[in-house]
Image (cartoon, rainbow, N blue to C red):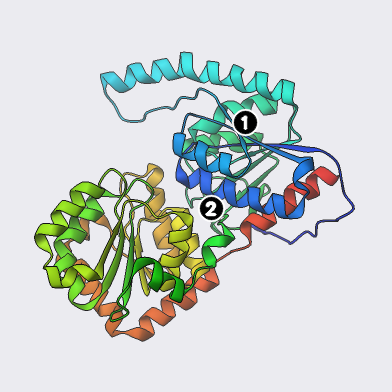
Amino acid sequence: MVRQAHHPEFVEGFVGFMKIVFTGGGTGGHIFPIIAICRELRRIYPKKDLKMIYLGPKDEFGSLLLSQEGVKVKRIMSGKIRRYFGISSFFLNLIDIFFKIPIGFWQAFSYIFFSAPDVIFSKGGYGSIPAVVAGWVLGTPIFLHESDFSPGLANRFLAKFAIEIFVSFPKTEYFSLKKMILVGNPIRREILEGSKEGAKELFKLSGEKPVILILGGSQGAQRINDVILVALPDLLKEFEVIHQVGSKNSKQVKKEVDVIVLDEWKKYYHLYPFLSEGELKQAYAIADLIIGRAGAGTIFEIAALVKPSILIPLPEAAQNHQIKNAYNFAQRGAAMVIEEVNFTPGFFVERVKYLFSHPNEMEKMAGEAQKFSRPRAAKIIAEYIFEYLKL
């Protein structure tokens, strides 16, 4: 049985300079949980005595967000193993295994050796391998967090180096039960602080219809957008839509909307390339139903917000982790899952209308989502780190 997280209390009298290295794969799914933990660390420990560093692969978006949190970003080279067959993947794997990964290891080793951090916290992914292995060689304590129900190959490899493995799902696969601590996926508490009044003003909502929030992730989800665009004329007759389409897709989506949506319905459609944290918290607050992929970040934010949702798992996700995430969340009725093979405009619109015509179903979804939620995950992890360093 996975250990449940307890809630260690931080002792205010504990002082001393601390240095914590974070590492991860470089995607939003790694960066946002790290930001949530950094904010909790700042809340419980004096800023002047705490230095936080991020070691990871090149990622302009992640670097900007982390820098805004006062985290020093140090880029290191990293590689990955491609599991699909082909001549190009074969040679790319050779380059990564014999060139990028070794260079990344020595970069991480050098930085960790000279900076001597107190602890390394890994969010996992291929980009975290150099820092974790180098830290282990140098004897630095390592904590690992796994967001998904089914860990990727990188985290399954890195698990042997970790003192503790924080997990999001109760029955996370592959890891040793002795190492696992169930905490949930860290979320930024600020995204829970939106208001319906603020959302109406920000998005210029009519207030005439229920609101559906459609999320495609930080880069959007082209196949979701394609289905939504076909379904949009039917949706806008009964609902108001806030749609995050992704920065790469926004211009094309806007052109298509201008053609397919009647002028009288356009006031009910609100297109955004990307929702900033301030916009996202307001969109979450006003949404009556949330549509999105099944990454752990999205699921645990929906759960903490106590919202009904429809999840469309990304079928190409490694280890089918999004499909497993979605069904693990939905098994007690916390969400509706539509696999992409069934995600057609007609079926999607029918499912949305069904939910809104059965308010008891939506109330049950919200209730079960609340039972699943673990909004204090970031705070608990921060407290665990400090508890360990006090020993």
Q: What residue would you read off at disc 1?
A: 132
Is any part of residue 3 visible from this angle? yes
Tell me the element at label 1. Answer: helix
Amino acid type for the residue under numbered disc 2: Thr
What crowding class fits label 2: few (fewer than 14 Cα within 10 Å), some (14-19), or many (20 or more)?
Answer: many
- Quadrant containing the C terminus in the rendered view: top right
Is any part of residue 334 visible from this angle? no
Q: Residue at point 22% right, 47% down?
A: 251
Q: Position of residue 32 (x, y in %)?
A: 52, 48
Q: Residue at point 69% right, 59% down?
A: 5
Going by the picture, which residue comes out furthest to the right? 13
On screen, residue 259 versus residue 166, left or right, reads left
Mark in the foreground, 2 or 1: 1
Q: Residue at point 58% right, 48% down?
A: 35
Quadrant in the picture for residue 239: bottom left
Q: Above or below — where is 66 with respect to 99?
A: below
Q: Above or below — where is 288 with respect to 329?
A: below
What crowding class fits label 1: few (fewer than 14 Cα within 10 Å), some (14-19), or many (20 or more)?
Answer: many
First in sequence: mark 2 vs mark 1: 1
Amino acid type for the residue under numbered disc 1: Val
Q: Position of residue 148 (x, y in %)?
A: 49, 50
Confirm or deny contact between disc 2 and disc 1 (CB under 8 A).
no
Q: Residue at point 35% right, 55% down?
A: 293
User: Label 2 to label 1, Cα distance in Å?
Assistant: 21 Å
Q: What residue would you read off at disc 2?
A: 172
Quadrant in the picture for residue 227: bottom left
- Quadrant containing the N terminus in the rendered view: bottom right
Q: How many marks?
A: 2
On screen, residue 220 versus residue 49, left or right, reads left
Q: Position of residue 332 (x, y in %)?
A: 44, 72
Front-most of residues 27 and 79 = 27
